[in-house]
Amino acid sequence: MDNKDSEAEIHPLKTEDVKAQENHENSVERRIISKQSSRLSRLSRWRTAAFFISLFLCLIIVFAFSFIIPCPERPVSERTWFRNYDNAVAYQFLAIEDVNEDKVQDVVFAFKASNSSSSFNRSCPDEGLPSPCAFVAAVSGTNGRVLWERPAAEEIEWMECGIKQLGGAEAPGCLVVGKPMSLMAVDLQTGEVQWRQSSDFGANYTVLTPVSVIPDVDSDGVQDLIIFIATGDKIKTFIHSGKNGKQIGSTGNLNVDGKARYIRLNPGSSLYFLFYTENSLYAYSLKDLYSAATGIEVKLPSLEQDPQWEKNIDHATHRLSLLSSGDINYLAKIPGRSRENILVVNSKMATLINAQNLQTLWTLNVSHVVSEPLLGYYKPDVLGIVFESKIGPNRKKVMIVESGSGAVQWDLKLNSREESPGPATLSTADHRSAFLIWGEYQAAGNETRSRAPLQKLYLFHPSYTNVLLELRNSTDQITAFNAALFERSRHACYVLLRGPQPSEEPGSVSLMKRKLKEDVSESRVIWLSQVAVDSEQYVRDRLYRMRFLSRV
């Protein structure tokens, strides 16, 4: 201390300089700290501002999508709707297609009357047709509103919808075969005529249905059409352009030994048409039919022939040796593991034949089959075949048969009218099917044969093998019946077209769509055996909650 004091006394200016330097350093440090704190404060304010701006933008986006920008509305489908026509007759055509592209299936049908409905107020003379005439109409599947109606022909021989590229349009179309001698392509979305062609089918002809779409053979980029017309024991072949309806080549002639029907089959990459009568089976490749119509031998991939099939065809008569006996009632295509198989049904049995080597896979004793065999699933993802066979006056037997083995999985006996509609199936989410069957069930020992059978619609699902649900009792004349999922994997419905047919006197024609669940909730539970597993209400509730599946 004495030394410092003495030094301070000796050097007073030096001490003052040191203090000044210390004060300067402290001031610099304070300025640095102040600048740093100022910078941090400004950065903190920018971060706060960025956070609130981001939050504000998020709120604006949420608000816009919630209240300003409208979400696509899902059409609200009515559970049941009707469309009625007075002084009309109905044709047996019923197509389920999405006409207005709202992702809900719509209904296309045909009727004969003097005028259309009040929605369009179109008459037969508007199209140069005598009155009454045949109309084609499309009705919304959501509420039954008429989407379009069009006078088409004096009479309709056949109608087929969902044909792609018809008329060269992007949307599918409907082909109408009318009388007298007309072909017409109709746009499915608008009902406008794409093309109309007259064709000389001859007198007293019958169109073999369905009309077949074939690959493009005239190289215009659009699929073409082949139409078979039966006149007596001959079948005339007409090939028409799908783009403009013009006939390709001339008319071909096929000789058969009776009233014929046909199916088309694709063994490998080839295309064959199988014509069958009560006694014989004939096979023609598309190449044979095209060459006969045009007189030209063309090498196209779509005109290839299958070597195995060609070995089994008698090229002089075109008979195909599938079975030793004739008496064929139905011919149907059954999907197999790798390719389609052929189901041959005669008066005594059903036989499944391998379409590749034409060998028999199985046979089943089933006599007097009364409706076209139908496909469905009794076991998960195991394809089955539904047969309806006559077993007596006003009596039929319904059988579900496994397609792979021919084993009977389920059967039921019902009273049935001659004009009763055929069955229908709907795929369910458990990879099985719901089966819709017409008839009248009577418990064993309780049958009555004195009156005509009632016309009732039943629902059967394999989850309850001993239960039928009675959905409805219809006393009206049913012209056409179909069932479909009106939306993807949901909205299971059935459609009824009721009223007199063209050979009868005009009357009231009614088209109805009914949601299946509405009938299930009000249905009557029928136990096929004496053992009741669950309560009736539990069965109704479970089948009401059943979900459906749109198979590709």
Image (spheres, rainbow, N blue to C red):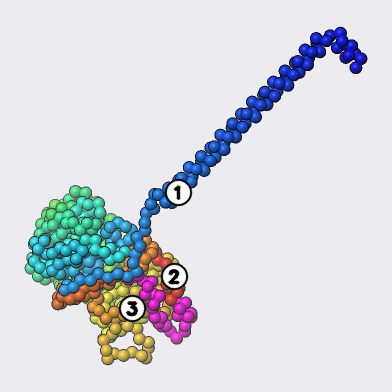
x and y, in percent, of residue 516 in the image:
36, 71
Q: Is residue 268 left or right of residue 530?
A: left
Specify the quadrant of the image occupied by residue 391: bottom left
Q: Is residue 390 magenta?
A: no
x and y, in percent, of residue 550 in the image:
37, 62
Is any part of residue 212 visible from this angle? no
Q: Is residue 4 left or right of residue 323?
A: right
Q: Is residue 291 left or right of residue 360?
A: left
Residues shaded magenta = 513-539
Q: Is residue 454 left or right of residue 43?
A: left
Question: Residue extending furthest right?
Answer: 2
Q: Which residue is at a point 53% across and 37% down the rendered structure image?
A: 50
Check disc 1 and report the residue beneath it: 63
The amino acid type of the residue labelled 1 equals: Phe
In front: label 1 or label 3: 1
**How far apart are the two marked residues, 1 and 3, measured between alpha carbons?**
49 Å
Check disc 2 and report the residue beneath it: 545
**How far apart are the two marked residues, 1 and 2, measured between alpha carbons?**
36 Å
Q: Secondary structure at mark 3?
A: strand
In front: label 1 or label 2: 1
x and y, in percent, of residue 29 in the image:
70, 23
Relative to the observer, which residue lies in front, 146 or 543? 146
User: Which mark sits nearer the N-terminus, 1 or 2?
Assistant: 1
Please say if 27 is above or below 328: above
On-image quarter of the C terminus: bottom left
Badge 1: how crowded within 10 Å, few (<14), some, or many (20+)? few
User: Which mark sits nearer the N-terminus, 1 or 3?
Assistant: 1
Relative to the observer, which residue lies in front, 244 or 94? 94
The amino acid type of the residue labelled 2 equals: Arg
Q: Which residue is at a point 18% across and 69% down the rendered structure image?
A: 111
